[in-house]
Image (spheres, rainbow, N blue to C red):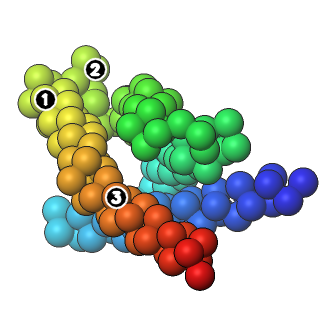
Amino acid sequence: MEDIKKLLIYFRNALAFSYSWLVLLTVLLSLAGGNADVSVIYLVKLLALCAWGSLSFVFAFFAKIMKKRGFVFCLTAFFILFVPAEVLMFYLMGIFEGAGTPLLWISLGVIVAVFYISAILIDVFVMRRRSKVYTDKLMEYRSKNQAG
């Protein structure tokens, strides 16, 4: 039961963070574009997108069955769960009108690829190096305690 409570807290926090930022960006873009109207239906669709994204994020990175997997596996699971829903919501929100333009599809593909590759590079070059340093320090500490 404690795990479910923790997952719901993570979901709430992810949803609040993502939705508040996207609403803020939507309002700023609307004002910058000269169109100060943001419909309630658009905000509800944005909420649904953020809710699915938050749910996918919490499942991929915090669920007990995913904890023993590596970061890249969790990241891939997140993208597999979220990207199809994101494309569907883009259609429902009117961002991709009809079949969408090639520029929109290329933009979406580039954004997804850049985020995916960036996360993998951070994992490879930063986090693995830190984990090696942490492991070395832990082994050093254990050897000192066992010798004494």
- Residue occupying the point 14% across, 25% down: 101
Q: Amino acid at mark 3?
A: Lys
Q: Quadrant of the N terminus?
A: bottom right
Q: Residues within 10 Å of mark 2 (few under 14, many from 20)?
A: few
Instruction: Name the mark on residue 132.
Output: 3
User: How far across and down, in percent of the image, does residue 47 sit?
Assistant: 54, 52
Decide if residue 23 is in sight here: no
The residue that label 2 is drawn on is 98
- Residue occupying the point 43% across, 43% down: 71
Q: Secondary structure at mark 1?
A: helix
Give the mark nearest the N terminus, 2 or 1: 2
Q: In the rendered view, does 146 fall on the left or right side of 122?
A: right
Q: Nearer the viewer, mark 2 or mark 1?
A: 1
Q: Residue furthest right?
A: 1
Q: In the rendered view, does 95 fall on the left or right side of 63?
A: left
Gap in angstroms between the C-alphas marked 2 and 1: 16 Å
Instruction: Name the mark on residue 121.
Output: none
Q: Quadrant of the C terminus?
A: bottom right
User: How far across and down, in percent of the image, does residue 87 sit?
Assistant: 37, 30
Q: Secondary structure at mark 3?
A: helix
Instruction: Name the mark on residue 106.
Output: 1
30 or 106, nearer to the observer: 106
Q: In the rendered view, does 7 fall on the left or right side of 87?
A: right
Gap in angstroms between the C-alphas marked 1 and 3: 38 Å
